Image: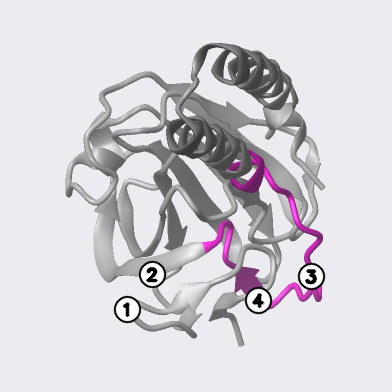
Amino acid sequence: MFHKEGQKIILITLVFVVVSFFVIDNLITIEWLRKTLMVVVLGFFLLILQFFRNPKRNTHSNSQHALSPVDGKVVVIEEVEEKEYFKDKRIQVSVFMSPINVHVTRHPISGTIAYSKYHPGKYLVAWHPKASEENERTTVVVENESFGKVLYRQIAGAMAKRIVNYAIVGENAKQGEDSGFIKFGSRVDLFLPLNADIKVELNQRVRGGESVIAEMG
């Protein structure tokens, strides 16, 4: 199953593969070179397919759990000053996605979307300390009774050149459902209340819509 954001790119890549195979087969006479080029082109197509995959996730909805918004590795767990929306201290948990991770962004909690804003910006590497404030990004806040308000921020990386955000203020968010997509490498920051019980560790691998990031008692 492939994400709708990849349909156009997959189609264009497929046309490129077909044309490339035709050209290689008709113009390259050296057998080993012809096969090598075909394998490279086919490998490129398979990479595009795996990048836009959208596997079904078994989300066990729980109002007291905040789930990981994306697949990847936990690279930050720290208390910080969130400057855009809360303007106070929160626990930040950041998940870094490599190009081979699933890049679907999912709602970490269910609730009402209280804030949704896109910010144009730079394309610093996603793990850069200033990426959260200077890179292209979107900020979404979802509110429910257990957590109050939870903010998550999609951040473009050095390779990512487009962020897609489906969150609309006033609409209901459902835990684990698609809330957007980031193309080609990036990171998502999750800002939680200070009394949230963090359930992950640094360098832990997490799965979007399944791994529990934090719990509220």
Amino acid at dot 2: Val
Position of the C terminus by quadrant: bottom right
Residue for badge 1: 202
Residue for badge 2: 74
Q: Distance between the residues labelled 2 and 4?
A: 17 Å
Task: Please provide percent x and percent y for residue 143.
Answer: 65, 53
**Residue positioned 56% across, 33% down in the render:** 38
Mark 4 residue element: strand
Task: Please provide percent x and percent y for residue 49.
Answer: 66, 41
Task: Please provide percent x and percent y for residue 152.
Answer: 50, 50
**Residue positioned 41% across, 32% down in the render:** 160
Q: Which one is closest to the eye, mark 1 or mark 4?
A: 1
* Residue 136, quarter of picture: top left
Q: How far apart are marks 3 and 1 (CA)?
A: 23 Å
Depicted 195 relative to depicted 155: above or below: below
Mark 2 residue element: strand
Question: Can residue 181 be seen in the rendering of this structure?
Answer: yes
Depicted 33 relative to depicted 203: above or below: above
Which is nearer the N-term, disc 3 or disc 1?
A: 3
Mark 3 residue element: loop
Which is nearer the N-term, disc 2 or disc 4?
A: 4
Q: Distance between the residues labelled 3 and 4?
A: 11 Å
Q: Which numbered tag is attached to residue 65?
A: 4
By secondary structure, the bulk of the magenta-drawn segment is best described as: loop
Q: Which numbered tag is attached to residue 59?
A: 3
Amino acid at dot 4: His
Q: What stretch is highlighted in magenta?
A: 49-71
Mark 4 neighbour density, 10 Å: few (under 14) some (14–19) many (20 or more):
many
